[in-house]
Image: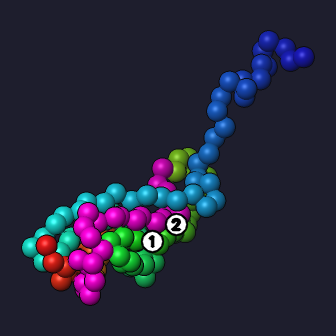
Amino acid sequence: MKSSKTRDWSRWLPPVSLAPQPGALWNPAADVYRTEDGWLIKLELAGVQPKEIEVALAGRRLTVRGARRDCEVKDCGQVQSMEITYSGFSRTIDLPCEPALLQGARVETDYRDGMLYVRIRGSAR
């Protein structure tokens, strides 16, 4: 038995986890807009390299996946706090239209200032 001066407080405290669990997925925020010639989807992907992003349209389902990777920080002794999620991500958006309306649509992407802009053009109203 421990003395009253050296009580084991660990049973009262939650375990510390400073990094995401392996295989954890990050779910980036997205905005979806209807345009005159199709759709505009914006995804918040700060810190993601464009080469890490994959975009696919199947029917009315748009899927964006990739990974945000941590960079090496030199002269760093010990981690004090980690709030940014570094992991793979996958975001699927079902567009509110019939899949036939998206047949033959062009998918264009633009990445700037941490935002991915996906334009789907040529779909009928």
Report the residue at 90% width, 17% height from top.
1
Quarter of the image where one finds residue 33: bottom left
Residue 85 part of the magenta-drawn span: yes
Left or right position of 48 against 113: right
**Could you say which is closer to the camera, residue 6 or residue 15?**
15
Which amino acid, mark 1?
Arg
Q: Nearer the viewer, residue 118 or 17?
A: 118
**SS class, disc 1:** strand
Q: Which residues are magenta?
A: 83-106
Q: Secondary structure at mark 2?
A: strand
Q: How far across and down, in percent of the image, does residue 65 sit?
A: 45, 71
In this view, 9 is above or below 51: above
Q: Image quadrant for the C terminus? A: bottom left
Instruction: Kindly identify the residue that appears in the image at 62 percent across and 54 percent down.
Output: 21
Whichever of labels 2 and 1 marks the residue nearer the N terminus, that label is: 1
User: Pointer 1: what residue?
Assistant: 65
Look at the picture and state if 20 lies above or below 8.
Answer: below
Disc 2 versus disc 1: nearer the observer: 1
- In magenta segment, residue 64: no
Dots 2 and 1: beta carbons under 8 Å? Answer: yes
| Residue 88: mark in rendering | 2
* Res 102 quadrant in image: bottom left
Distance from the alpha carbon under mark 2 to that under mark 1: 7 Å
Residue 79 image label: none
Residue 104 visible at all: yes
Viewer-side residue, 55 vs 81:
55
